[in-house]
Amino acid sequence: MAEFESAAAKYLGVRHAIAVTSGREALALILQGLRLSPGSAVVVPAFTYHAVPAAVRDLGLRPVFADVDPRTFNLSPESLEECLGRHPETRLVLVTHTFGVQAPVAVLRDLCQKKGIPIGEDRAHEFLRGNQGNLIGVAGFHSLETSKPLSALGGGIAVTDDPDLADRMRRMVGAGRERAVEATRALVRQVFQALITWPPVFALSAYPAARACALVGRDLEDRRVDPARPVLGPTRRRLHGLHAAVGLAALDRLDSENEARIHLAGLLDDLLEPRVLRQRFERRDALWMFTLLPGDRDRLAFHLLRAGIDVKRDLLCDCSRLFGSDLPMPNAASVARRALHLPFHPWLGEADIRRMAEATNRLW
């Protein structure tokens, strides 16, 4: 475990990395390590994974929401400034690099520094080397789930350059460890998910089911979220060595996979026609997802599925609506309603990218 944490910290260009059982547990570790007073406000982007504000709430803190940029889906500096004005009790701002697109860190950091508010980074959609991935805030967290850029077949990592914060986080996980039986179950579950989404298997199993559901206007996955359901256990637990071994092996090939993500995203962006609306990104961004913004998401998803192209939706949602907000978040609501994700991973070939682009241009 120590070897994995050291290797991950070196790769990311940070001083300390603490591996735990999930990304949400890593977020909880940071929030508890910062010793925020009960009831303190934590700014969360409105368009995010529901477990992020739920974890904030489960620890007795209060998530408040700022809207996102409708082009990049990242936290809007203008909305953040308004939110901080409405909530002077804010003690932390969470910044997400949504789907691997880098947030406007310089502007956001300046806004927070003026008010003396620290930044925490949600880096669950990325795992970048050195000068690309250096922290802008007091701490950040990564997810190590199956589909993420660095997969340990489960788990998460909290990272920081603050030795005192790192020491407090290590003490919190020192007494709790994931049991071998739990780690084995998690590995089996994650391996099954990886197997079922492997293209040759997917084409014969989940794809026919997904297409059948689409034909009758149903979704294969039930993505309904219960905002009242707790997402955290009572204690933070260190990641099992089984996952750490998988993560170490995955680190060896991560540079080439990130380079492939950058190349494939640029190629797909070049091939798509200007009228095909999509998330805006820079050519240095190693995307986790390639996201379209159709006017009629269900229609496009149906026709792409019929063309043999699986798509995803509802990975993130408008959490301001789920958890309550003092103001509507129109950009987050619009993106959540329209976002459609094309198949995207570093093992795609250029022929796959060209086929997706041709089908999307034709069906748009």
Image (cartoon, grey):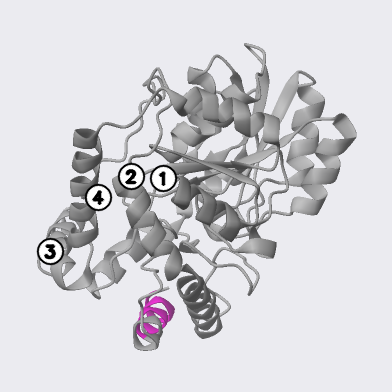
Dot 4 or dot 1: first in sequence order is: 1
Q: Secondary structure at mark 4?
A: helix
Dot 1 or dot 2: first in sequence order is: 1
Q: Secondary structure at mark 2?
A: helix
- Furthest toward the left, the residue is 204
Report the mark closest to the observer, 4 or 1.
Answer: 1
Q: Say what amino acid the circle numbered 2 marks.
A: Gly
Would you call the spot at circle 2 few (<14 residues within 10 Å), some (14-19), or many (20 or more)? Answer: some
User: Is mark 3 in CB contact (under 8 Å) with mark 1?
Assistant: no
List the residue tagged with mark 1.
1
Tell me what residue is drawn at x 52 percent, y 76 percent.
Answer: 259
List the residue tagged with mark 4.
190
Tell me what residue is drawn at x 82 percent, y 27 percent.
Answer: 85
Would you call the spot at circle 4 few (<14 residues within 10 Å), some (14-19), or many (20 or more)? Answer: some
List the residue tagged with mark 3.
208
Quick one: 351 or 362, which is closer to the camera?
Answer: 351
Magenta segment, prevailing SS (helix, strand or loop): helix
Q: Say what amino acid the circle numbered 3 marks.
A: Pro
List the residue tagged with mark 2.
241
- Quadrant containing the C terminus is bottom left
Tell me which segment is drawn in magenta: 355-363
Dot 4 or dot 3: first in sequence order is: 4
Q: Say what amino acid the circle numbered 4 marks.
A: Gln
Q: Disc 4 and disc 2: Cα gap in Å?
A: 16 Å
Report the mark closest to the observer, 4 or 2.
Answer: 2
Q: Secondary structure at mark 1?
A: loop
